[in-house]
Amino acid sequence: MIASTTGMAPASAATTAAAPALIMGEVDGSARAQDDFFWHVNGAWIKAAQIPADRSSINPFVELDEGVRTRLHSLIEDIAKGKHKTGSEEQKISDLYLSFMDTKQIESLGLKPLNAEFAQIDALTDKQQIPALMAWFNLRGINAPYAIQVHQDNKDSSKYVLDIGQSGLGLPDRDYYLKADDAKLNDARRKYQLHIEKMLRMAGQAHAADSAKAIVAFETALATIQWDKVALRDPIKAYNNIALNKLDELTPGYDWTSYLSALGVSGKIDRVIIGQPTYLSGLNQLLQTTPLATLKQVLKWNLLSSAASQLPQQFDAEHFAFYDQVLRGVPKQQVRWKRGVNLVDSGLGESLGKEYAARYFPAQSKTKMEQLVANLLVTYKNSIDTLDWMSPETKKEAQTKLALFKSKIGYPNQWRDYSSLQISKGNPVANLRNIRLHANQTELAKLGKPVDRETWEMTPQTVNAYYNPEMNEIVFPAAILQAPFFDAKADDATNYGAIGVVIGHEISHGFDDQGAQYDGLGNLRDWWTADDHAKFTVKTAALIKQYNSYSPVAGYFVNGALTLGENIADNSGLAIAYKAYQLSLGGRPAPVINGLSGDQRFFLGFARSWQNKMRDEESIVRTKTDPHSPPQFRINGTLRNMTPFYRTYDVKSGDKMYLPPAERVSIW
């Protein structure tokens, strides 16, 4: 839906809906709202909640996802009971799932599914053969020193381009290799090397310990030359449009012609976007100085690791033991049917999504969601007009961008085509490879064609939402449109505090420190005055400082620069959702429900939607890799900047939630 610049009739303030029971009474008296609102609302729930043994956290996203997995399991099991025409989506769903579930067959196959792949590597006699093999890895989504992505050209959103960017680490972040003063990260790296050694030994590799040491040393060299996650957020620095005939200047001697031919794009493109030129240049030097024997070990390890979940139980269990137990603190592996559902969901997600949306997404939910989105967009329009820090010139550009916003709700208008995806019984590794090959070839086939603006980056059954700056669109899959985020029967205050904030959050991404660099057509273009840039930078610097002080685990702090975009969206989304709720009242007082004012229900609904309990190991991984702040600071951090919250709960100087007015950050 194209965003309207005209006013809308406000939603009725009169409602007979009741506030959900949890919001009405189950707050935790051990924390005052004025000192820790996150714990005040969610403390009782956190004390009682048990993180599932196969999860690293428990929160509404996890709880809703568990329900979605159960529904998808029922759909898949029904399909798997039938007989289907070869090549049909039903046949592919059935064979993909049943092949993964057939552990007896997997055990009998052993490592045979990897023999041909290992032989490819063993056949390497010269480093000049590596580029073509890198293409083979990239096409099948196997970890390699660089990765590819097809997307809209950041400076001409009417065209598709091929991106090449850094990759190749087996640990979550470069800090795991480089932070010598962090005992926990050092321990994870030591256990990673032992994990590689054990996997290689089980695979029959001679000198497994030496190979594991060489592999970790190679990945450490990669980490040394990689950009950190803050630098990766800069779309200007990441936009390096290089003609193919100039690539040799960046990476002398590397055979890009062979690579692009093996990738299947020769003749389709004459240039690529290099995300991190210094990394690619450094990688080229590293490849030249690393012995071919070591490179073969690295490649074999990545092949083995990428297929572990489809291999006999000893490999599957060891992979889980490191990546889930060691890194994330998860004590128990998910039952196999859940993992089978996840596999089908990743490979044939929109095929499942058609049925999921038909069964579980009522038309009235889409209608009410469209009204909420429209009200939030109108509110954003009004808010831009009243900003005291932005010039009329920049406001005009901001309004133009907002008017071009498109919203997608529930499910796509057109579904993904899986006709060329090859799935068969009996070889789960081949099926996994084919899933990733099909996905990447589908993306590469877009090169040279008009941009398809109907595609979705998430399936309807995904409990999430997103903003795409190149499309200038906000997208809300069906699965997130459930309580506690969205309840068609709940009162307006609760919905605005929950899904309204999610909507405002996604709209705000169009105006965060990254999104604000794109115009309404999705092009990377500076539409700000210099003075407005300076004022925006002052505000964002203050927000970075605030969040740098927050610590979810002792000794580990939020990276305010890494999380800046999400923090802007959190703070602005909350502010806009609150204004939209006030607009929805149409000048009438909000009803009092169960003794709670409208503003109280708004803030309680907001805090409840982000209730969370997480294992410490997962929190550490998140502080290193996640651009989102920990949930407790997505609540308390935003509310400390929200003046209406101070009025609602009588927050005063001396309260822990208090920030002096001069220190409160308000952007959009």
Image: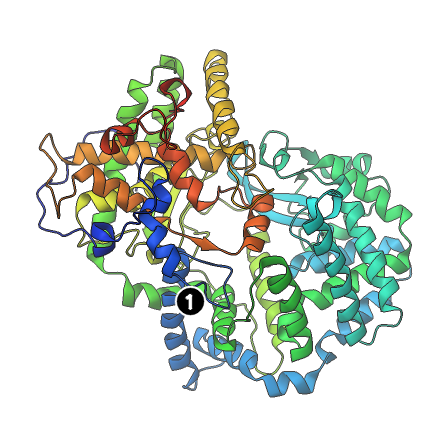
Residue 144 visible in the displayed image: no
Residue 40 x, y percent position in the rendering: 33, 45
Residue 127 position (above or below residue 425): above
Q: Quadrant of residue 181?
A: top right
Q: Nearer the viewer, residue 114 or 57?
A: 57
Q: Amino acid at mark 1?
A: Ser
Judging by the rendered image, the residue that carries numbered circle 1 is 351
Of residue 100 and residue 339, the one placed in the foreground of this image is 339
**Placement of 564 over or under 632, stated as above or below:** above
Residue in the image at 33% along x and 29% along y? 642
Question: Residue at 42% of width from left, 30% of height from top?
Answer: 511
Q: Residue at x 33, y 38 (%)?
A: 504
Q: Quadrant of residue 77?
A: bottom left
Q: Nearer the viewer, residue 23 or 652?
A: 652
User: What x and y, as percent, mark residue 128?
Assistant: 87, 53
**As displayed, is residue 555 above or below residue 616?**
above
Asked if residue 309 lies left or right of residue 648, the reply is: right
Query: If the image is split into quadrants, where does the C terminus sit?
Result: top left
Q: Position of residue 261 (x, y in %)?
A: 73, 53
Q: Please state, as top left, top right, bottom left or bottom right, where the N terminus lies in the image.
A: top left
Asked whether the viewer can see residue 344, the reply is: yes
Instruction: Label 1: state its secondary structure.
Output: helix
Image-based side of 302 in relation to 293, left or right: left
